[in-house]
Image (tube, rainbow, N blue to C red):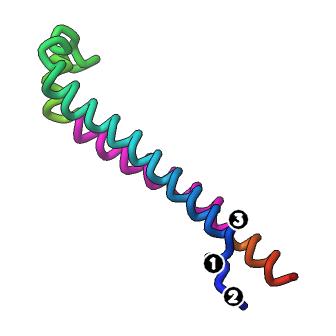
Amino acid sequence: MQDPTHTAAAREVLRSYWQKNIALMSVLLAVWAFVGLGCGVLFADWLNQFKLLGTGYPLGFWFAQQGSIVTFVFLILIYAVAMNRIERKHKAELLALQAQEGGQ
């Protein structure tokens, strides 16, 4: 039986997988950069006019000290969950192609 990754349909599935992976990483990295650099450094003075609910900490200070770290951990969780879904979908597509080619 031939390797299912060598057919044109399988290559298309793999190309789609990598496009989704890169798009997801790009969005999450952009969010991380905005929160870490934007909220924690560039916009910190403006954000300091607001207080973190229930604590009284200036929001810009909180983003610089904790917010970017908390955001980073949530982004890792989002990436893991999203990639599990993407990988499950593409694996099913590759297995379906393999079964289809095996039946021919």
Q: Quadrant of the C terminus?
A: bottom right
- Residue 77 location, x and y as percent? 41, 49
- Residue 81 location, x and y as percent? 50, 52
Q: CA distance from mark 1 to mark 3?
A: 14 Å
Q: Which secondary structure, mark 3? A: helix
- State the residue at coordinates (19%, 35%): 66
What residue is shown with label 3? 93
- Residue 90 location, x and y as percent? 63, 62
Q: CA distance from mark 1 to mark 2?
A: 8 Å
Per the picture, the main secondary structure of the magenta-coloured stretch is helix
77 vs 50: above or below: below
35 vs 75: above or below: above
Residue furthest right in the image: 104
- State the residue at coordinates (15%, 20%): 44
Q: Which mark is residue 2?
A: 2
Decide: few, some or many residues near mark 1? Use Cα within 10 Å; few <14, some 14-19, many ≥20: few
- State the residue at coordinates (46%, 46%): 24
Give yes or no for residue 82 being in the magenta stretch: yes
Q: Earlier in the sequence, mark 2 or mark 3?
A: 2
Q: Nearer the viewer, residue 53 or 35?
A: 35
The answer, for residue 57, to whether it is visible in the render is no
Residue 85 left/right relative to 60:
right
Q: Which mark is residue 6?
A: 1
- State the residue at coordinates (37%, 50%): 76
Identify the image quadrant of residue 62.
Answer: top left
